[in-house]
């Protein structure tokens, strides 16, 4: 199925990606972000906060935004 992924990490990008049926938010995050820690990101589905085990649906819009910017002063 096709979803819109908006990755605001680094230079950022937005693109449609194909995922298998019954893919969860956590599975997509791991696939796209590798070894990054989900706790360092704000992850939303259709502009709403979501649970890690939420199952994605056709046409969902997922945004991944870092909560900590490397090199930024606290």
Image (tube, rainbow, N blue to C red):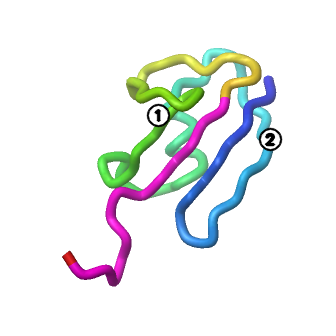
Q: Residue at x 62, y 16 (%)?
A: 22
Q: Quadrant of the C terminus?
A: bottom left
**Relative side of 49 to 5, left or right:** left
Q: Which residue is mark 1?
A: 26
Q: Residues within 10 Å of mark 1 (few under 14, many from 20)?
A: some
Q: Residue at x 53, y 54 (%)?
A: 33
Element under label 2?
Answer: strand
Indicate yes or no whether the magenta region holds residue 22. Answer: no
On the image, the x and y values in percent for residue 32 come to 60, 50
Q: Which residue is mark 2?
A: 16
Q: Quadrant of residue 40?
A: bottom left
> In the image, which residues are magenta?
61-73
On the image, the x and y values in percent for residue 9 come to 53, 63
Looking at the image, residue 70 lies above or below residue 41: below
Tell which of 30 and 11 is nearer to you: 11
On the image, the x and y values in percent for residue 61 come to 66, 32
Q: Residue at x 35, y 57 (%)?
A: 67
> Of the numbered discs in the image, which one, if any, rests on residue 46?
none
Q: Residue at x 80, y 41 (%)?
A: 16
Indicate yes or no whether the magenta region holds residue 62. Answer: yes
């Amino acid at each position: 199925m096709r979803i819109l992924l908006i990755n605001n990490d680094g230079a950022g990008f937005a693109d449609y990606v194909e995922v298998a049926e019954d893919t969860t938010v956590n599975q997509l995050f791991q696939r796209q972000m590798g070894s990054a820690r989900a706790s360092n990101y704000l992850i939303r589905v259709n502009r709403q906060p979501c649970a890690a085990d939420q199952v994605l649906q056709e046409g969902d819009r997922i945004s991944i935004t870092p909560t900590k910017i490397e090199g930024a002063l606290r």
